[in-house]
Image (cartoon, helix red, strand yellow):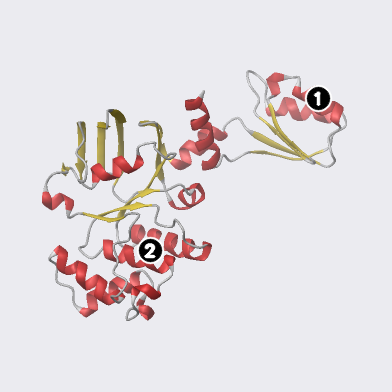
Amino acid sequence: MENAIRIKDLRKNLQNREILKGISFDVKTGDIFGYLGPNGAGKTTTIRILLGLFKADSGELEILSRDINDSETRRKIGFVLDEDGLYDNMTAEENILYYARIYGVQKSGRNISKLLEMVELSDRAGDRIRMYSKGMRQRLALARAMVHGPEILILDEPTSGVDPSGQIEIRNIMKKLASTENKTIFLSSHNLDEVQRICNRIAIIDRGTIRLYGELENLRKEMSKRVFIIKTAQSVPEALIDELKHNPGIGLQEVSENELVFSPSGNTEISDIISSLSKKGIKIEEAIKKEATLEELYSAILKVTEA
């Protein structure tokens, strides 16, 4: 699959501080790509370089295998940033038409209706934007971003400040844009649950360096390899819990009333732990491999960088 975005050894200094320290990653055509990291990690700087608002000090950046500085290349990108760029005293239709004129594209009433239908705002097309909720504004901003028919959408926290039902609506629209409209989506977000639900590939940046990058499902599976949950029929006695804690090889990580989480090391197998518990009179109801969440991946990476 070809690259929609290719970044190689990108560096950027601002105010005598190195913001990006040689970052590299690819976004494949058709991806919903999650770009994650704490505040100050370098996400916003990366986005500004992608949009041509900043120029990188060094490194390579291509959009659809073309130079980012080419004006036609930039027209392949649509974006939604912190400010939605909408005009409160205009209707939804008027906002879309206004941006169509800015981009120099012809938009008939039918074209505008299709865009508004895509973001589920057809029934509010004639309302002034000042009457819209935050979620509705964000959906209209998505329509605005697509007015010139871009192939790539760069979205910076598109569900920030939106209520839960509005977040679901926006997530569904993003998935639809990728699956039925063939858009590649670059999503910068602090909402880990959202990223886990809709993104197929991710990169985690911290202090200007990419700390984790790849297929989200593969990364989760890799982290899950040696973590197991054992569910018991009864509470495990405190004395046995203490004994387990003092055996580093079995890697007892979490304890709840009827559930133990282990990450065994060395030659210790989960079958050895089950056998040991059974011999001590503990009835095992279920033993399953734990599926790592994106939150656990994210936390593990940041803990490593803080160490």
- Residue 150 position, x and y percent, is 22, 58
What residue appears at the point 18 percent right and 73 percent down from the top-left corner? 107
* Position of 134 relative to 189 (above/below): below
- Using residue 246 as the reference point, say whether residue 145 is left or right of it: left
Task: State the CA–CA distance, disc 2 to disc 1.
Answer: 52 Å
Depth order, front residue of 17/206: 17
Q: Residue at x 32, y 73 (%)?
A: 116
Along the line of sight, the residue nearer the viewer: 140 or 244 = 140
Task: Answer whether residue 4 is visible to the viewer in this image.
Answer: no
- Residue 184 in view here: yes
Q: Residue 159, percent across and down?
A: 43, 57
Q: How many marks?
A: 2
Tell me what residue is drawn at x 32 percent, y 51 percent.
30
Residue identifier under label 2: 138
Residue 5 placement: quadrant:
top left
Tell me the SS state at disc 1. Answer: helix
What is the three-letter code of the residue carrying label 2?
A: Gln
* 75 on left or right of 242: left
**Tag 2, which secondary structure?**
helix
Q: Where residue 242 is drawn, which disc sits there?
A: 1
